[in-house]
Image: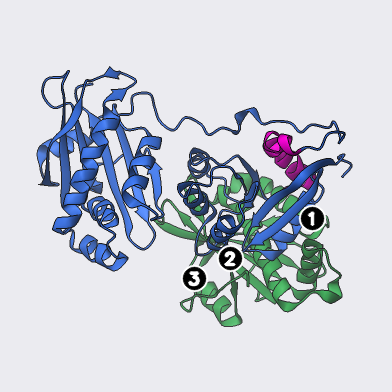
Amino acid sequence: MNPSVNFENSREVALSLEKAWQFLSGERAMFDVLVEMPACPTFADFSVFMPLAVDAGARTAGVGVLIQREDATIVASHMFGIPKDDIQEADLRDACAEVCNVFSGCVAPNIGHTSSICIGLPTLASSADFDEISKGSVITLTYRCDQQIKRLFVLVYGVFLAPNNGANHGHP
Amino acid sequence: MDTPNIQLSHPFKILIVDDSRAIQAIIKRAVGHCGYEPVQVTTASDGEQAIEAVENDPPDLIITDWHMPKVTGLEMLQIIRQRGHHRARVGFVTTERTPSMLNEAKLNGAAFFLNKPFDDAELIATVRANVGDALRDRQIAGGSNAAPHILKDAAPTPLHNSDDPVPYADMQRALADKLGNLPFRLIPNEKISPEHMTPTNLLGLYSATDRKGVYGIGFMDANAVCIVGGGSARKTPMEVRAAMSQGEPDKLMLTKAHEFLSAMAQTMTKTALGEAGDVSLAKASIVKNTFSKLAEVVSQVGHRSDFRLSIPGYGEGRMAFFLLNP
């Protein structure tokens, strides 16, 4: 068992992700925990990452949220309270960054056996950033939601390597 | 939301601070149903903008995120309090859950914390509970009788232990007196240990008229000397950082730090353990971290006050005050 992730609470975290998704999108959803067979998801239209400093920066863990455009539109429309057709690109980026922020708040307390986790700022990754993160980081747990229009993934990184170019802070 | 509206003689001003426009929109919608009329809502995207907004038009309530670029919610709270804005209630709507962090915000006067995700009713109830007393004077006679709840625990928790030689509030005041308008962040109760010490440190020995021998000790690491001394002397951040990187405060910084230690004597006169008569700084000198007596002092268990001080652009340093003969 990987010592950097508290697997015992993964179902609890999944439930909190469901509550968070309802808050953010106004829709119900169920998240599955993929422990035995960690998925290796591919880049999504809105791939947002959050660094988590563990034990005063001794280790950097992270959370990644992969959202396809259709679902991003649903979330942004609900959060801004405006029709989907009126949603702009910047609104999508803003909403998805906040999804990552709120999801990170659900995941962070269970990232390891420590009480010292410092949440950073969400960053929107490009395809190149995503590749760099995938190569240098270690996914320890994956939550998957199949009920959206497209699949929604929440990736928990035991070790997270931010891309060198310093991807853009998610909230424009 | 079916909350009856309470008519106010002038608007209930709310400032929402969050780097997400989407969250701003959610909070704005919710507080629009808080049951007061009229409500005036403004927004800011980070702590820096919020400080400016507070200076221009002080709100009744600030609802802020914690993690934001430039200036965080906590730093914003500390800065507005240091600048004398004590009337505005400040509540956090955040993903931050770390007890020590939340406690720090509470020490700085945060009125409430609400974790994301939240529901509208929860936010509205929290807002009403925390501003009801402040808005009571504004209620127009004949309005709704649905008086809001008053949060009994809205006052900050005690800032120090009863045997602290230097209470947190006194240290805040002393620093504000020396640093003027420089925004600083003061974190209490982080015990300094021998491994935290810089190669050279400033050590002050206090004597008291009613006590024999050394009454107390004040400790400032070289960084704290540069920050307090440099800040008091209105040195530029670059000058202070240069001194810190060399571990060598200049003569003026040392003089100002010496004055600061001297000023702290007054706060050490009266503790929960009793009065010690007149306390004064008998001597202050630079000592190396290898000085054996120093390690002994910083290992002391009780009767101590430890602080971490940081100033944006300068850096951070550590200070501690010990009573040896309480």
Viewport quadrant of the C terminus of chain B: top left
SS assignment for the magenta stretch, majority: helix
Q: Chain of mark 1?
A: B
List the single residue furthest toward the bottom: A128
Give the residue at mark 2: A122
Relative height, residue B91 to residue A22 (above, below): above
**How far across and down, in percent of the image, does residue B106 sit?**
52, 39
Give the residue at mark 1: B29
**How far across and down, in percent of the image, does residue A21 sit?**
75, 56
- Which residue occupies the foreground of this view, A36 or B13? B13
Q: Amino acid at mark 3?
A: Ala
* Highlighted range, magenta: B118-138
Give chain A's shade: green
Quadrant hosting residue A57: bottom left
Q: Chain of mark 3?
A: A
Give chain B's shade: blue
List the single residue furthest toward the right: B2
